[in-house]
Amino acid sequence: MTREQSSIETDGGTDASVTGRRSESVDYLDAKINLFDPATPFMRDHLRLIWALFGVWVLFTFGPVTATFLATETMTGTHVLGFQLHYFLTALGSPIGALVLCAVYAWQRDRLDAKYGISHETESATESGTAVAADGGERQ
């Protein structure tokens, strides 16, 4: 195991003395989140997930409306379960898509939490009197 591998923290951050990055001293509860420069690998992976799902949400939400504007004849002339395609996609596709996105986010977030060792169990006191927070940091 290399020194860099052994310095990975449970929150996905690394020891700043090894990598020269500032992630070691980040107080997650008070730190501002920079969407373009995440402080830790966990934040980077989490933001990547959020941006990807946001792109899919934009497609689910604005796709049927845009398609109806661009291909009016096709969207209004095609019927699915007795409804015009544009109505079917807007009335059923968008809400169902939002539910699917919620499920995908929860599943992927659990996978990220497991990857970085983040537990959402209740806080437990350590021998030094500090408690481990759900994000992997410590509380006094």
Image: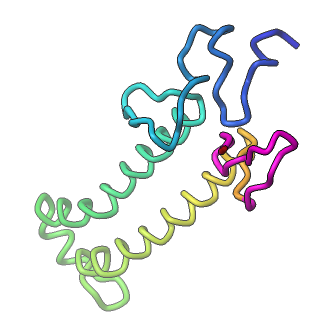
**Is 133 within the magenta?**
yes
Task: Answer above or below: position of 46 versus 14.
Answer: below
Residue ID at (48%, 62%): 101
* In front of the other: 36 or 118: 118
Name of the residue lying farthest toward the bottom: 82
User: x%, y% of residue 60?
Assistant: 34, 62
Residue 75's image quarter? bottom left
**Is 12 within the magenta?**
no
| Image side of residue 139 versus residue 123, left or right | left
Instruction: Quarter of the image for the C terminus: give it.
Output: top right
Total marks shown come to 0
Instruction: Quarter of the image for the N terminus: give it.
Output: top right
Boundaries of the magenta span? 121-139
| Image side of residue 17 versus residue 99, left or right | right
Task: Answer above or below: position of 22 versus 107.
Answer: above
User: x%, y% of residue 103?
Assistant: 56, 66
* In front of the other: 134 or 5: 134
What secondary structure do most residues of the magenta stretch adopt?
A: loop
* In front of the other: 109 or 136: 136
